[in-house]
Image (cartoon, rainbow, N blue to C red):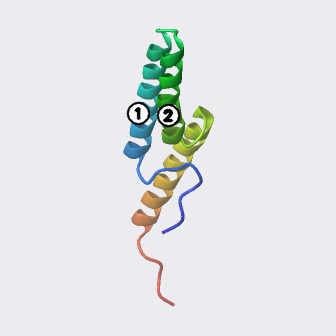
Amino acid sequence: MSELPIFSSRTLTEHIARGAGAVALIVLSLWLLSFSNLPAIAVAVAPLVGAILLLRGCPMCWLTGLFGTIQHRKARLTAAQSGPPPLH
């Protein structure tokens, strides 16, 4: 089987779950920032770091990975439908 493109996940479900988790962490960080005092700002950084890790970089990196995951999935399905290569 071919190697996964950069930023891609093994399955589309896994990739979407990572994106949803990152969005939840970003919302949590914004909610913590609404308290607008220094300790809350310091605490709000932790969810942002988690979101960056889940996205494997910026949101554009996640989107690039989504396209790579879809492309890899289509290639796997095409390979599975065509069957094994003929013997010579």
Query: Nearest the camera: 52 or 47?
Result: 47
Q: Is residue 66 left or right of residue 60?
A: left
SS at circle 1: helix
Of marks 2 and 1, which one's residue comes earlier in the chain? 1
Of residues 7 and 42, which is closer to you in this image? 42
In the rendered view, tell whether residue 74 sits above or below residue 66. below
Q: Give the x, y percent position of residue 81.
A: 40, 63
Q: Nearer the viewer, residue 84 or 36?
A: 36
Q: Residues within 10 Å of mark 1 (few under 14, many from 20)?
A: some
Q: Is residue 13 above or below residue 29?
A: below
**Residue 62 appears in which quarter of the rendering?**
top right
**Residue at 48% over, 69% down:** 1
Residue 7 location, x and y as percent? 56, 49
Q: Disc 2 on helix, strand or loop?
A: helix
As shown in the figure, which amino acid type bears the numbered disc 1? Gly
Query: Looking at the image, which is closer to me, 9 or 86?
Result: 9
Q: CA distance from mark 2 to mark 1?
A: 7 Å
Q: Are marks 2 and 1 in contact (CB under 8 Å)?
A: yes
Pointer 1 residue: 21
Q: Say which residue appears at 53% left-offset and 18% top-offset.
A: 41
Q: Is residue 47 above or below residue 41?
A: below
Which kind of residue does numbered mark 2 sit on?
Answer: Ala
Per the rendering, the mark at residue 51 is 2
